[in-house]
Image: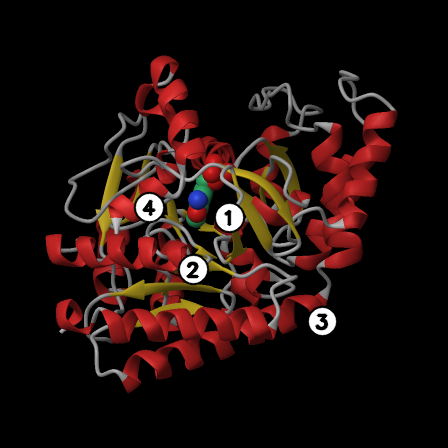
Amino acid sequence: AREAYSAARPRSAAIHARAREVMPGGNTRTVLFYTPFPTAMVRGEGARVWDADGRDYVDFCGEYTAGLFGHSEHRILDAVKAAMDHGVNLAAVGENEGKLAALICARFPSVEQVRFTNSGTEANIMALAGARGFTGRTEVLAFRGGYHGGVFTFPVGVPTSPVNLPIPMRFADYNDAEGAARAIREAGDALAAVIVEPMQGSAGCIPATREFLIALREACTETGAVLVFDEVMTSRHGFGGLQQRMGVTPDMTTFGKYMAGGMSFGAFGGRRDIMAMFDGHRAGAMPHAGTFNNNVLSMAAGCVALGEIFDEAAAEALFARGEALKASVNAACARHGVAVHFTGTGSMLSPHFRPGPVTAPYKASVAEEQMRELFFFDMLAAGIYLARRGMVALMLPVTDADCARFVAAVEEFCAARKPVLA
Ligand code: PMP
């Protein structure tokens, strides 16, 4: 499979070889790295992408959820072009940032005030800084398998974080309501914040149970720790995010990905009393700087993305399409009697090469890693572009026919690879 992959992609190979001279590994995003070399994409339109060697794919990766609107969405393009026509580096506040903030606060009742960043990673850094300032405490509790950005990654089986964090961390097991509540109470008034994805994304689209989120809510209320929902990926799951669907209200929420129509974006927001830590009208306000925090392209695109395109009906339709896809792809796997199934919520799903149900993150075995790799390369050969780990994030322009093609490709994979899948 690898030889066929390489032989079909001489231009991608050359792009990689050149970049490798001047960039370690030849790339700049861990998630896009794989051997022998990653496929280089040169164009996208709607739900299609084209690689450097002229092959086209249906894009089921959806830029890891940031590509919600599809490629070259004309209303977003128009907004960005109009903004560019007026100059982009004005070193000043503009009208759109307040407008975008109002759109976010209106959608998420738990978000009374919000501020912008360049990325989801920064949003989490600032939310935790705010929580620490507000509580006067230092420690943060996160969950094994959690991913909150490049510096906040906590793979299962790794004791802390692969990156040195300047924050004293504690860890608990995802979806273990009792254990998490106990850990929060044990930490007591040392604990500034609990940060959690209401569905773990990078760990394999593992939804939280409502019971688990409620246990976190209750323990945080009791101890005074700030409950932060990282909805960087999951806010797409409803007009008011996954928090609305789950009926659990955090103190703070972080955002990112699709919200600026595909431009660089991050935001953190929540209770007015916590966000007041950053209010420059107050003496001793916490700093929150960043040259591109309010960059005019993101602000303009975000106003159109949230204000005109991704409304309640669009959010519900996307959620329903994802649920339908999950049902039909799982039925296809079941028809072949193989231990492959997909988990997830709404428009995000991930394959697991083991029998279900999967309710907590796990360290994949070598065999599982190999099947994941085989799946990725088989899907590429079938004209389906996915995240390397197999995650699907549907985009608005993905059609029922695209979904049917995906299910057929998975079915073909199950049939062809049955001997190794068991
Ligand atoms: N939190 C979650 C849940 C994420 O999935 C990601 C990105 N995959 C981030 C935070 C970080 O966002 P960014 O890549 O924009 O820094």
Q: Residue at x 17, y 58 (%)?
A: 368
Sequence-first disc among 3 and 4: 4
Q: Nearer the viewer, residue 30 or 338?
A: 338
Q: Which mark is residue 383?
A: none
Q: Nearer the viewer, residue 12 or 297?
A: 12
> Where, by quadrant of the figure, is residue 267 drawn?
top right
Query: Residue 229's spot in the image, x, y percent?
Result: 46, 52
Tell me whether circle 1 and circle 4 mark residues in contact (CB < 8 Å). Answer: no
Sequence-first disc among 2 and 4: 4
Sequence-first disc among 1 and 2: 1
Sequence-first disc among 3 and 1: 1
Vertical order, 352 against 21 (above or below): below
The answer to whether 340 appears left or right of 281 in the picture is: left
Please give the residue where the numbered disc 1 appears in the rendered image: 55
Query: Residue 317's spot in the image, x, y percent?
Result: 64, 73
User: Three-letter amino acid code at disc 4?
Assistant: Tyr
Please give the residue where the numbered disc 4 appears in the rendered image: 5
User: Three-letter amino acid code at disc 2?
Assistant: Pro
The answer to whether 160 appears left or right of 332 in the picture is: left
Between marks 1 and 2 in the image, the one whose residue lies nearer the viewer: 1
